[in-house]
Amino acid sequence: MELLIIILLVGLWAIGATVRAVLSDGRGHTPGVHSREGWHAGHLPSVPFSEARL
């Protein structure tokens, strides 16, 4: 019986710690990415593979 109470208390503590961490982190919102360089595809093909003639 004591083991069950200990497991329950540890579980409640873990849930509480998780909720506090999520709330202090901004509920999962991350800041926007600010890029100074333009986006480029690098060495990717210019047409999708489904349209490419092999």
Image: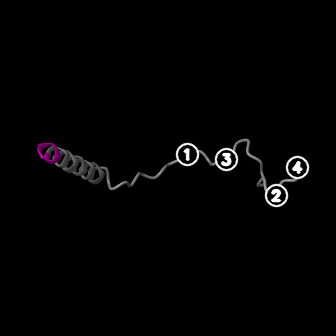
Q: Amino acid at mark 2?
A: Glu
Identity, as a three-letter code, of the amino acid under mark 4? Leu
Marks 2/4: CA–CA distance: 9 Å
Label 4, secondary structure: give it: loop
Observer-side mark, 1 or 3, equals 3
Name the residue: 46% across, 52% down: 32
Alpha carbons under labels 1 and 2: distance apart: 32 Å
Query: Where does residue 54 sit, x and y in percent of width and height?
Result: 88, 49
In the rendered structure, does residue 31 fall within the stretch colored magenta?
no
Residue at screen point 20% across, 50% down: 12
Residue of label 3: 40
Dot 1 surroundings within 10 Å: few (below 14), some, or many (20 or more)?
A: few
User: Pointer 1 and pointer 3: residues touching (CB < 8 Å)?
Assistant: no
Residue named by callout 2? 51
Question: Which residue is nearer to you in this view: 3 or 33?
Answer: 3
**Identity, as a three-letter code, of the amino acid under mark 1:** Arg
Give the residues in magenta: 1-5
Q: Residues within 10 Å of mark 2 (few under 14, many from 20)?
A: few
Residue most extreme to the left: 2
> Can you give x and y, in whole percent of width and height, for residue 50 in the image?
79, 57
Badge 4 is on which residue?
Answer: 54
The residue at which mark 1 appears reads as 36
Front position among marks 2 and 3:
2
Between discs 2 and 3, the one toward the N terminus: 3
How far is mark 1 from mark 4, CA to CA?
36 Å
